[in-house]
Amino acid sequence: MGNALPTPALRRQPRLLQRLLRDPSPVLDELRDELGPIYGLGAGPARMAVVGDPVALRELFAMPAESFRWKHKFNVLGFVVGPGSMIVSDGPDHTRRRKSVQTAFSRRRLNGWIPTIVERTDAAIEGVFADLPADGAQIDMYPIGRALVLDIVVRALFGPRMAPHTATIGELFERPQAYLESSFLAQLPHPFPYTRRARVAADRRALDAIIDAQIDDRRREPSGDPTDVLEALVIDGTLSDSEIRDQVATLIGAGYDTTAASLAWMLTLCARSPEVWKRLGDEADRVFGSAVDVDHVTLAALEFADRTMRETLRLHPAGVVSPREAATDVTVGGYSVPKGTLILWSAYLAGRDATAWTDPLEFRPDRFVEATAEQKSLADISWVPFGRGARNCIGFALAQMELTLIVARLAQRLSISATGPVPPPRGMVVNRPEGGAPMRVSARGETVR
Ligand code: HEM
């Protein structure tokens, strides 16, 4: 057994907990400076452990999944994504549900989405050009990026057949996403009609009806489209229709806001780093300009865009903290974490760890190639925006592929600039820049393919 976790004074805890559950980043910065990257908070059934030390995280991710529970008393996601979602499942149920989706997310299928990602980004860029304000005023790139990411996720999951429903799906996710960001108390279960919770449940029923119609469609008339995830799940036959519905709601829910917020951060940082933006544009000219087909080889050649994506997610992981409950007593980083503790592991703390990263608050994509071999191995365990191990993000390859291709294509065709300080992070479930991503945007003025 290890040592007891350090904790802040008891009288400060109610306020700290309230702040942590609303907007975690400032509290995490504050308590790291006071207590270090691992500490305890709360008491009794609301006992928590924050873990942000890279070496302790490596240990945590290597422990067997049975040491933890994702279906725990604080997991409010189930109400939105459904009780059969892999995200709120444990044991054999989790393994079966995750495996079916993982098979559907094969590398071949993923690579098949590359041309669509570039084509949809080009369509979004045309939309930006059509709506550019004549007076050169700033525009908010966050909603533009959100619409683009939703468009891509819906096409990736269902193929082009579903594209006409994209806007409706986006609307059905607005209320649930806002609901998940509301206070924990506001999310306590209750059966009352005409409330926000009742409207969120109605949105989910409307989404289910859309998915059900698509499942029926696939059974009646398979498209044979090798990139269609829903068709792969239906043909696979392992999951019931209700399980398929919950996984589809999960994939949209987990894949849409996270990627859109990361894109907003990437543009926010790049709009203040003209040199980074120029290099992205030059690389994109070279890579897209010499590509016969846009495919996985094109993606692999976008090395600077890949580093820019990684640097953004280091500083601003979409999940600042991710929860799991200790199902048994465990020891993490030399500290005892008793059974029943809610562990909030933090990609945000690891990404800013001063032992792992030189000048951790600086946005410097080249840090990944400048590091020595020793720094690189510490940096590797400190870069965990998608988690690691058996419960890591199932969409990590799709998200990275989208962010890299989108930023490269945008830099090839647009100039962006913003002044003033980088906005603070907002949001507990998904970390996004406060106030969106306002910036001045114009055409880059180069010929593109
Ligand atoms: C930049 C974008 C994204 C980030 C930063 C991100 C991050 C994460 C993190 C931190 C976890 C939890 C790991 C844990 O609890 O240990 C997770 C889980 C998950 N993510 Fe993502 N994610 C992103 C995009 C996506 C996309 C595009 C999809 C799918 C289309 C997706 C689907 C999922 C699912 C289904 C899980 C649950 C896996 C399980 O419980 O086995 N995510 N993600």
Image (spheres, rainbow, N blue to C red):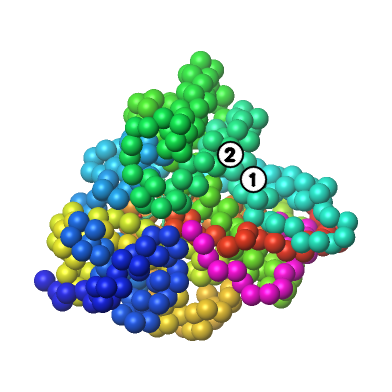
Question: The disc labelled 2 sits on which kind of residue?
Answer: Gly
Identify whether 138 is placed above or below 235. below
- What's the residue at 46%, 45% (across, down)? 179
Note whether residue 275 is visible: yes
Circle 1 residues within 10 Å: few <14, some 14–19, many ≥20? some
Q: Quadrant of residue 262 in the image? A: bottom right
Question: The disc labelled 1 sits on which kind of residue?
Answer: Ala
Quarter of the figure with the N terminus: bottom left
Asked if the stretch drawn in magenta spans residue 352, the answer is: no
Q: Position of residue 244 (x, y in %)?
A: 40, 31
Q: Which label belongs to residue 147?
A: 1
Magenta residues (range): 409-427
Q: Secondary structure at mark 2?
A: helix
Looking at the image, tell me whether mark 1 or mark 2 is earlier in sequence order: 1
- What's the residue at 60%, 69% (across, down)? 423
Instruction: Measure the alpha-carbon separation of dots 1 and 2.
Output: 8 Å
Q: Quadrant of residue 327 in the image? A: bottom left
- What's the residue at 40%, 77% (across, down)? 30
Identify whether 38 is placed above or below 61. below
Q: Secondary structure at mark 1?
A: helix
Q: Is residue 270 left or right of residue 203?
A: right
Count the marks: how many?
A: 2
Asked if the stretch drawn in magenta spans residue 414, the answer is: yes
Q: Is residue 2 left or right of residue 136?
A: left
Residue under numbered circle 2: 170
